[in-house]
Amino acid sequence: MELVTLPQSRELEKSILGAILMDKRTLPLAVGHLKKEVFYDLGHQKIFDVVKKMYDDGVYVDITTLNQKLKDDEAYKELGGAFYLSKLTDNVTGAHNVNSHIEMLIEVYKKREAFMLFKQSEYECLDNDSQAVDLLSAVNSKLIALQEYGNIHEKTITDVILSLNYSRDKAQGGELLGYDTGFSELNNTLAGWCRPDFVVIAARPGMGKTAFMLSSIYHLCILNKIPTAIFSLEMSSEQLVERLESITSEIPLKRLRMNNLNDAERKILLKTDDKILLSPLHIEDMGGISISQLRAKATIMKQKYGIKVIFIDYLQLMSGQGKNNQNREQEVSLISRSLKSLAKELQVPIIALSQLSRRVEERGDKMPQLSDLRESGSIEQDADAVIMLMRPNYYEMTNPIEIGGTEYATNDLVICKVEKNRHGTTKNLPLRFLPETMTFIDYTN
């Protein structure tokens, strides 16, 4: 059987370690972008690991101090000890090449890790007890993590200033910084669905979370052709599309479901289906999807379809695949942190629907609060914005409600409460709910 030589480069490893010892300007760069596993040689791994610990502890790093820390280590002794450290600097001319050397070493490491991952996957594929969907999801997640590791092309302050000025120019010209939410006051408050924000839409059952989501998707995807993904853990893709048909055509949902349509409405429905077919909408209705599976599927959708906005219905139905001894609150916290991280990685806004606890029902005014987030954990902390929905008519409230100095009748009113806004003010906004088509629209008196 032929022995395989794994991708490696001891010369690159020596060059980087030598640069660290010779020019202290390279130390933060190397420590910031490398981990000991990038080095193939076990002795080099040990040297770098000790260098990193010394750097983290604020200990001055040179040949003498490093040798003092390493002198009793067997792997270090096998390399040649202090003499080996001194020889590392022989062929180093300075810090100017260390960037490219780090990139090249990371490239070798990625090839080595990819080989090991695929080799391990061969054995797992032969395990009859393993599930294909879990195996593929795990492999995909590891590949994504491997692809993302080691990007050392950092933004300069010039890049950041140019980006800010571009955004301000858009705002000055009346453009939204993000994508149209479908609601004018919400656009004014949040500047649209902005990347890479993680937004939570929270409400008790029956308040219309899914209707709010689909009303926004109608504006985003059907009217404005923004590539949009829905991860629906509660409703099937058929149910979602049927509700979009009702929103788009303005034909009552009940009549659509019963197929109780006249000839004119059937013609409208055909045109509506054409609009939906031509829209860049992608629906994944896999129930009980895990955060790792969602991450893998979202990444593929981003690469394949250029997805700009992601909706999740709803957060508490996801599984975290964390440690077995985690309680549900810890698991939901892991999910919310992962969604915030995913929004940043993919550079898209992620809007996740969330349930509220029954404590809302115990209060007289029925207005939700951040503390009502069910199994909240870190949802409140991770979210860039939290929007809460409350329909007074659902609770048989009849007295007019004042919002922003104006009184609104309660029969079709929805209070859209921006309870958290990392980029601006918090406030209550009035929306109107049209129950026949399950649609949210701006409230105009």
Image (spheres, helix red, strand yellow):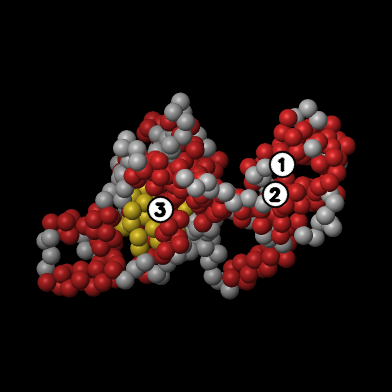
Q: Earlier in the sequence, mark 2 or mark 3?
A: 2
Foreground disc of the pair 2, 3:
2
Q: CA distance from mark 2 to mark 3?
A: 37 Å
Q: Earlier in the sequence, mark 2 or mark 1?
A: 2
Q: Amino acid at mark 1?
A: His
Q: Nearer the viewer, residue 434 or 310?
A: 310
Q: Nearer the viewer, residue 36 or 270?
A: 36
Q: Residue furthest top?
A: 325
- State the image coordinates of residue 30 (x, y, percent, origin top left): 73, 49
* Label pair 2/1, CB-CB below 8 angstroms: yes
Q: CA distance from mark 3 to mark 1?
A: 37 Å
Q: Which residue is mark 3?
A: 297
Q: Write the residue at 69% across / 65% down.
A: 159
Query: Which element is circle 1 on?
Result: helix
Query: Which element is circle 2 on?
Result: helix
Q: Write the residue at 49% across / 37% down.
A: 333
Image quarter of residue 444: bottom left
Q: Nearer the viewer, residue 306 or 131?
A: 131
Q: Write the residue at 31% across / 50% down.
A: 285
Q: Is residue 442 left or right of residue 15?
A: left
- State the image coordinates of residue 424 (x, y, percent, origin top left): 59, 53
The answer to whether residue 334 is seen in the rendering is yes
The answer to whether residue 371 is seen in the rendering is no
- State the image coordinates of residue 136 (x, y, percent, origin top left): 39, 47
Q: Amino acid at mark 3?
A: Lys
Numbered tag placed on residue 10 in the rendering: 2
Q: CA distance from mark 2 to mark 1?
A: 9 Å
Q: Amino acid at mark 2?
A: Arg
Q: Which residue is mark 1?
A: 44
Q: Quadrant of the C terminus?
A: bottom left
